[in-house]
Each structure stands twice: as structure tokens, then as C-alpha cells.
Amino acid sequence: MNISSQSAKSEDVIDLKDDENFRNTKIDVKVHDSVNWKPQSKIWPILQIAAFIAALIINIALPTVQIVNVTPYRVVLIFSIAFLVIQYIISFFNEKIKAKVNHRSQFYFVSGVVLSVWDILSTKTNILPLPFFPGPGQILQAMFDDWQTLLISTAYSLRLLFIGFAVGTILGLTSGVLIGWYRQWYYWFFPVLKIIGVVPAVAWIPIAMMIFPSALISEVFLIVLCVWFPVAFMACGGIENIHKSYFEAARTLGADEKFLIFKIAIPGAMPSIFTGIYTATGLSFTTLVVSEMIGAKAGLGWYINWAKGWSNYAKVYAAIIIMAIVFSIVLAIIFKIRDRVLIWQRGLLK
């Protein structure tokens, strides 16, 4: 009975392989790209180039009402158009670049439209008047005119941010692990964490300036404080949310306390820790700007406060744009580190 059934199954397989419809069937396997997920389009990559060309034509063709050197703005538009065109040509020969171009094309298209509308409302018609609403050309002119001061200010801000963020992250991670793991630490220090953490770091500026001998140390202290709380809080919460069965299984296999902390508790809390680091990044930039406006002699926050005193809002917006670029780069670095550390989550989360 078994032999006959196996023979029937074998004949079915042979018939299936010999079937013409089976041979002509193609299995379409689509690989899901979680990064460049936009559907393929032939129109948007062209429209993004057209948007920047339109922005250049508008700037050249329409008369300028406000006094501004339009050369830097036009140079940037020309370089942007050249970059998009070269990228578009290369995309015909590289599938990865083609996916990236297709995915980003809608965003670049909207950026070109925004530049055109902004230029018309400010530089060309003065509907958005000076000094509060400078056009894109005036902001770029401010960047070119003050590039040395902006470069020095950016370097000062990065130094302050790096020191404060590194110290705050180390202290937050250490204290968070101790509070989450040991009951005595939780008993004494978690109330302190809750009390100090809810107070904005900038509220400590008068006390910091009174206690610490220099403005730099005061600024570092404020950034450390604003970074320490979210990292410590999320590290503590991440350890507390790990299921106890993991620790029980490790103890059954003979694991000591050191193994439980460094091999189970900290790795298991890493998703929560990185959430705290993301939150701390935004808070650190806010604290950085406010602290530099008070006692610093250089930095992007100092530059914004100085330019505002002269009512030169083009320089204010220039510093804000540079700050946004720096913030995006810092976040990109943190995301790269997170992807490397939490590689085990790939394919498990949305």
C-alpha cells in the first residue's frame, strides 16, 4: 500500500514537471527594500531636475527688489542641477543608485519648489520683508561672507557638544545600569533621578555659573546634565523590562553576576538605551544653543545671539541651517552605531 502510494506521488511529480504550464511559470520574487521603498517612477527623477532649473530661471528672469548678491545662490543652484543630472545618468547603469534617486526625487522636487516660492515672496516681490524674512540668496551670501567665523563657531560648538555628550552618556549609562540592577541604588538614586530629570537643564544656568570657575565648564555641565537623565532613565527602564526567565536560565547554567549584567542586562536594554540617546541628542543641541548665548565667546549659539543683536537675520538663519546640518550628521552617526550594535533586530521589527 505504501509502495503504490509513493509511486503515485512520483508519477504526480513527473507529470507536474512535464506540464507545459509549469515550465512556463515564472516565480516573481520581490525583495523588499526598507530604505528605498518608493515605487519606481520615470517622472519624478525628471521633475526634481526641472524644479531646480525652474528655481534658477525664476532667479535670473524676475527682477530683484531687495539688495542682494545673487551669485552664491545661483552657483549653488547650478551645482545642485549638475549633481542631480549626473546622478540621474548614473542611475541607468546602477540599480542601487537608481533606487536611491527614485526614492529621494519627490523630496528634491518639493525642495526646488520651496526655493522658488521663497525666492519670489522675498527677494523678487518683498512680500516677506526684510530684515525678518531674508531670501535664500541673502542667507547664502551671509554664509559666504562669514564663512571663517561660522567655521570657528561650528568647531567650538562641536567641541562642547562632544565633551558634554560623551561624559553625559557614560554617566547616564553607568548610573542607569546600577539603578536598574541593584535595589540599594534604586532606593537612593531613582528619586534623585526623577527630581533632577524633570527640571530643564537650562534652569541650572545661574547655579552652574556661580559654582564653576569658567563658562566652558558651566556649559559642559549643563549638556552633561541634559544628556544624563534620558540615558539613565531609559537604561534603568530597559533593564527592568527584561524578562526574568533570561536571568533564571543563565543562573541555571552557572552564570555569575558579571555575566548577567554585561551579557544579558546591558545587551537586552540596548534598544531602550538608544532611545534615550536619541532624546538626549535633541536636548543637548537645545541646551548648547541656550548656554552659548549666555556666557560663551564663540559657538553657533553665540553667533545667533550676536547676529540677532545687529538685526541681521540672514546670519541667524545661516547659523540655524548649519546647526541643522550638524544635527543631521550627528544623528546619522548614531543611527549607524545603533544599526551595528542592534544588528540582531534586523528583520524582526517594522
Image (cartoon, helix red, strand yellow):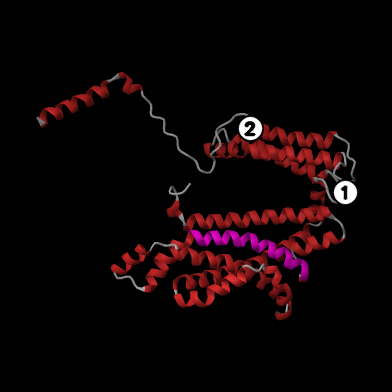
Q: Is residue 144 magenta?
A: no
Q: Is residue 275 magenta?
A: yes
Q: Residue at x 60, y 72 (%)?
A: 195
Looking at the image, how many numbered discs can be counted on the residues? 2
In depth, the one of 7 and 269 nearer the eye is 269
In screen coordinates, is 12 left or right of 126?
left
User: Which picture quadrant has residue 127?
Assistant: top right
Quadrant of image for the N terminus: top left
The amino acid at mark 2 is Trp
What is the CA distance from the residue labelled 1 to the residue labelled 2? Answer: 34 Å
User: Which picture quadrant has residue 28?
Assistant: top left
Q: Are marks 1 and 2 in contact (CB under 8 Å)?
A: no
Instruction: Answer with mark 1 or mark 2, whichever residue precedes in sequence.
Output: 2
Asked which secondary structure carries label 2, the reply is: helix
**Residue 297 visible here:** no
Q: What x and y, as percent, mark residue 328?
A: 64, 54
User: Most extreme residue toward the top, as rendered?
Assistant: 20
The residues colored magenta run 271-294
The amino acid at mark 1 is Leu
In screen coordinates, is 341 left or right of 110?
left
Residue hosting label 2: 44
User: Which picture quadrant has residue 24?
Assistant: top left
Q: What x and y, as percent, mark residue 305?
A: 80, 62
In screen coordinates, is 292 left or right of 88?
right
Image: 339 above or below 39 = below
Q: Residue at x 14, y 27 (%)?
A: 7
In screen coordinates, is 336 left or right of 307?
left
- Label of residue 130 in the image: 1
Q: What x and y, as percent, mark residue 231?
A: 55, 65
Pair 1/2: label in front: 1
How crowded pointer 2 is (Cα within 10 Å; few <14, some 14-19, many 20+) is rated as: some
Q: What x and y, as percent, mark residue 348?
A: 43, 49
